[in-house]
Amino acid sequence: MCWGFGVVESDLEDIYWTYARREIETKLQLKLGEQSAVLMCHHASLVLTVNALFSDKKAEGPQSAMAGAKNLGEGHTSVEDAVAAINRALSF
């Protein structure tokens, strides 16, 4: 409840007296839906990044990056190769 309404525990009594049960449930469902959408976006970004890192092909855009997401490990024969590719990508 505190997370959904952005309040501290001492303010919960005001929430209970101000809002109906249905309003509280709806607010929490909307907040959870928002956070789920954010996490899905983070997951999609991670898939695109890992795909770009491990694929040997040049990506032409989001479509090709998502299409190649099925072959994440393609082009690398060992864990050492994958770790080396990650280190190369992360070195600035």
Image (cartoon, rainbow, N blue to C red):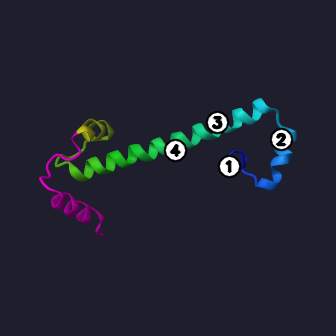
Residues drawn in magenta: 71-92
Q: Look at 17% across and 62% down and name the residue there.
A: 80
Q: Give the mark, 3 or 2, whose residue is nearer the N terminus.
A: 2
Estimate how packed mark 2 is, as few (under 14), some (14 to 19) or many (20 or more) residues with alpha carbons within 10 Å: few
Q: Can you tell which mark lies on residue 38?
A: 4
**SS at badge 3:** helix
Q: Kindly identify which residue carries mark 2.
A: 16
Q: In the current view of this chain or complex, which residue is farthest to the top?
A: 22
Q: Quadrant of the N terminus?
A: top right
Q: Give the mark, 3 or 1, whose residue is nearer the N terminus.
A: 1
Q: Look at 14% across and 49% down and name the residue there.
A: 75
Distance (Cα) linking label 2 and label 4: 28 Å
**Height in image: 91 above or below 79?**
below
Q: Give the mark, 2 or 4, whose residue is nearer the N terminus.
A: 2
Choose mark 4 or mark 1, whichever is in front: 1
Q: Quadrant of the C terminus?
A: bottom left
Q: Kindly identify which residue carries mark 1.
A: 3
Estimate how packed mark 3 is, as few (under 14), some (14 to 19) or many (20 or more) residues with alpha carbons within 10 Å: few
Q: Give the mark, 4 or 3, whose residue is nearer the N terminus.
A: 3
Which amino acid lies under the numbered mark 1 shown in the image of this protein? Trp
Which amino acid lies under the numbered mark 3 shown in the image of this protein? Leu
**SS at badge 4:** helix
Which amino acid lies under the numbered mark 2 shown in the image of this protein? Tyr
Q: Kindly identify which residue carries mark 3.
A: 30
Distance (Cα) linking label 4 and label 3: 12 Å
Specify whether residue 19 is painted magenta: no
Question: Where residue 11 appears, x then y in whole percent?
Answer: 82, 52
Q: Give the mark, 4 or 1, whose residue is nearer the N terminus.
A: 1
Distance (Cα) linking label 1 and label 2: 14 Å
**SS at badge 1:** helix
